[in-house]
Image (cartoon, coloured by chain):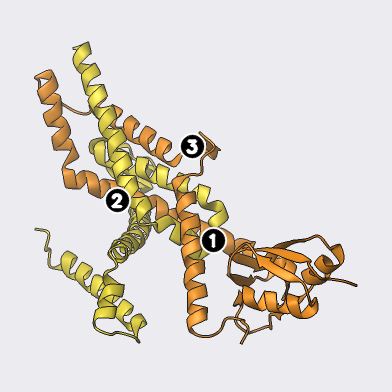
Chain colours: A orange, B yellow
Amino acid sequence: MSTNNVTIYLKAEQNIEMQTPEVCVKDIATLTCADSHVLAKAKSLKLWTFQEGECKRQVISMLKVIAEIEKACPGVSVENLGETDVLVEWISVDRHKGFAQWCKLAFVALISFFGTAFTIMAFHNDIGINEVFSKLYEMVTGYRGDGYGILELSYSVGLAVGIIVFFNHIGGRRITKDPTPIEVEMRVYEKDVNQALIATADREGKTIDVS
Amino acid sequence: MFLKQCLLAVIGGSAGLIVSAGVFTVLISVGLIPRFAGKMHVAKKVFVLEEMVIFGTLFGCFFSVFGEWGMIGRMVRTHAVFGAATEGVWNFVGTLIQIVFGLFAGIFVGCLALAIAEMLNTIPIFARRIGFRHGLGIAMLAVALGKLMGSIIYFTQRVFL
């Protein structure tokens, strides 16, 4: 079997969630190779096995992966096109379902609801919105206003339209296909967390790396 | 009169649009909701949270702009919605609403205050300047207790008057 001049291309992901404790090369990266035999061999190489009760988060350096592949298939050259460090998390299958999950969602939803309600009320109180509106009403109409009118109503409608356009959806339906600002911010946050975890593991020397 | 009403409508509508953009840019840029979702592992349901942000704001807007119409307690009492037991029932329900609103609004504001402080990188910069390495947890606990203390003093000593 000649494996000379065969190249394996790897594209590693930054963050992987595992359902099973055994981490293979094919779990953390997508691979391609002209030689299907070499490809199959490389895909099934075992990198790490999570133990019960131990840290459920592990950073694997791609150098380690390359070293493993080179050891298993001598003469093959390996090219990595993706990330240089991979964060692997082991998640038990049923942890993300059920009543506890529902409670957490309800908790966060309540914070979001009452928190933003309070924020906008405090903001209106800060700027003294009712005084501003009665002054505006007097300026435009020449009369002192009594009670609430078109100004307050259109302000509220404007606020609603502004938020809905800003967040890009209403009642679970998207207005355009763009991701919403919170979805964008969510991805940015996840990426930052992954990078911080990788950097911490590296600093503490806990990365699985070639020594 | 009609033209004046039209002008008022245009003023109100534009004010609402710009205010919502301004307020929500701040809320988004401190990244509070993604952090809640990330901590609680409900990132898949982030849509629900956004809906809650929208409805929460509209709710707050109604009660602060149309303050007189939002006097639910007075309305319930004058119309005696629960019959003879109105006073007792409403005392209980009112307290419950206060607890729920106060607790969740408090959590939100507490997170918001620290998130804004963190956005300005005050804590990492200060820690680096004074060569602070261990006991970050104690420092954070001190910050939380300080906020609690400040809040209690504010309300009991009536600093706002």
Closer to the chain start, of discs 3 and 1, is 1
Label 3 sits on residue:
A170
The furthest residue to the right: A1
Front disc: 3 or 1? 3
The circle drawn on residue B114 is none
Alpha carbon distance from label 2 to label 3: 21 Å
* Residue A45 spot, x, y in % from top left: 77, 75
Label 2 sits on residue:
A119
The circle drawn on residue A103 is 1
Tell which of A202 and A39 is nearer to you.
Answer: A39
The answer to the question of whether label 3 and label 1 lie on touching residues, with beta carbons closer than 8 A, is no
Instruction: State which chain disc 1 sits on.
Output: A
Q: Amino acid at mark 1?
A: Cys
* Quarter-of-image position of residue A68: bottom right
Compared across the picture, whether A117 is left or right of A26 comes to left
Q: Report the residue at 40% width, 50% height from top.
A: A113
* Residue A34 spot, x, y in % from top left: 81, 60
The furthest residue to the top: B2
Q: Which quarter of the rendered picture does the C terminus of chain A lie within?
A: bottom right
Secondary structure beneath label 3: strand
Closer to the chain start, of discs 2 and 3, is 2
* Residue B137 spot, x, y in % from top left: 36, 81
Q: Amino acid at mark 2?
A: Thr
